[in-house]
Amino acid sequence: MKIAVMGYGTVGSGVVEVIETHNDIISSRTGGEPLEVARILDLRDFPNDPHRSIFTKNFNDILNDDEIKIVAETMGGINPAFDFTSKLLKKGKAVVTSNKELVAQKGLELLEAAEEGNTNYLFEASVGGGIPIIRPMTQCLAANHIEGIAGILNGTTNFILTKMIEEHMSFEDALCLAQANGYAEKDPTADIEGHDACRKVCILASLAFGKHVYPSQVATEGISNITLEDVAYISSVNGVIKLLGQIKYLSEDRIAAFVSPAVVYNGSQLASVRDVFNAILVRGDAVGDVCFYGRGAGKLPTASAVAADMVDCAKHVVRRKLFGWGAGAEDYVIDYRKHIEMPFYVRAKASGVAVKSAFSEVKFLSRKGQPSDETAFITDSMTENELMKKLDGFDVINIIKVTNY
């Protein structure tokens, strides 16, 4: 079966490599039919690449080739990926992607295009790289009512926080090391400000509860305000700080979804996830907590997930998979600040007496070198709006959510 790859960057070249080096395994899982890379679309020239004879800069070479049945979109971004994918799906070609930005923003429209073309649009690699999570959620956990999801969804931020926790490295130094190692881009904003994790939260929430969630609906906070002082205080109560995407089911018409730093206690499966690894914890009413762990990015891990989706499409050429979600609504994702109760870590320029007068119950924290005028504490459960009312008049340095995962 002939396939094509759009975008020959890190992931796209990895897809070609995985398909060619594992075609004996792939053939055994597609009923004996190998996948043949017939076209690679990229605007750049690759004169020394062994596949140079099948490169094209013209999208129509793929669109109008009736023998190409499956296309991997590994271009990234919204355009022209959205336009190309829409046209392919409507023409009946299956498309698989690792493009989380596209799925988060345009997933509903592309799923509708796949239905129109009686074909499949799959995106296992868009969340967690090589970690299987999309298929387990839609198949293995299909009998469960999903109560919530919490995930370490970005390897760059987890690497930075690991260095801060284990090696007492400042945020700035850890970010520079992440860039030097190739984990962070020259402009790391999408990672450190939580935008990358936000897109993955949108996809997971849409799948889990059947209605599209857009990035603009997910309150998002990054890790750039986390300091070594915060790390030390949290360590004193056997906890660590992680950037978490969290999703909570409230009712058929309401969910909460947000991305933020969170205190995770050492007994949690998420607390031990180090360096660039990701983990996604799904809480079901029947199965309880299940955790999916592995490399959340990288050439071959992500390419393996893309190739697996291509195998799945090859097995479903004559019929569509029942897969996807429907339209959401503007008020579908609630303002968690008003409705979700949780404890909070607070660091402020304040006396213990002042804190006790404002809060009925707190746990005070300590660290080496703690200034006499600085107080850190963990509150009991309350909404963030209630917290901010209690902190009115305080000189607050930082606030971090405390998770129950």
Image: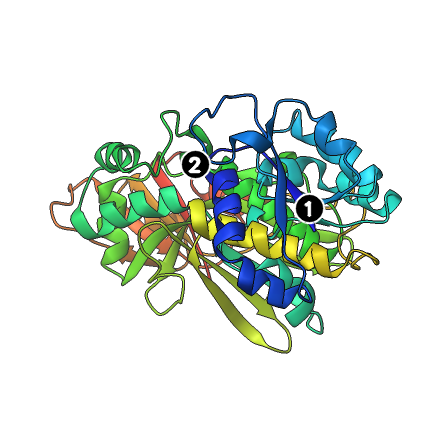
Does residue 72 appear anywhere in the picture?
Answer: no
Report helix, strand or loop for mark 1: strand
Q: Which amino acid does label 1 sit on?
A: Lys
**Residue 112, percent from left and from top:** 83, 43
Tell me how the rendering is colored: rainbow
Q: Between label 1 and label 2, give the one nearer the viewer.
A: 1
Crowd band around label 2 with a 10 angstrom C-alpha radius: few (<14), some (14–19), many (20+)? many
Indicate the amino acid at tag 2.
Answer: Asp
Residue 232, image x and y in percent? 22, 50
Instruction: Left or right? Give the position of 270 relative to 328.
Output: left
Q: In this view, does 384 lie to the left or right of 298?
A: right
Residue 130, horizontal then vertical, whole percent? 49, 54
Image quarter for residue 362?
bottom left
Write down the residue under mark 2: 191
The residue depicted at 52 percent of the width and 39 percent of the height is 12
Q: Are marks 1 and 2 in contact (CB under 8 Å)?
A: no
Q: Is residue 362 above or below residue 88?
A: below
Point 22% across, 42% down: residue: 228
Q: How crowded is mark 1: few (under 14 residues within 10 Å), some or many (20 or more)?
A: some
| Numbered-mark total | 2
Q: What residue did someone put label 1 on? A: 2
- Asked if one can make out residue 307 in the rendered structure from this viewpoint, the answer is yes
Q: How far apart are marks 1 and 2 (CA)?
A: 35 Å
Residue placed at 55% from the left, 41% from the top? 198
Q: Is mark 2 on a helix, strand or loop?
A: helix
Measuring from the top left, give residue 22's x and y in whole percent.
Answer: 50, 58
Q: In this view, does 269 lie above or below 286?
A: above
Q: Decide which of 339, 404 is in the foreground and name it.
A: 404
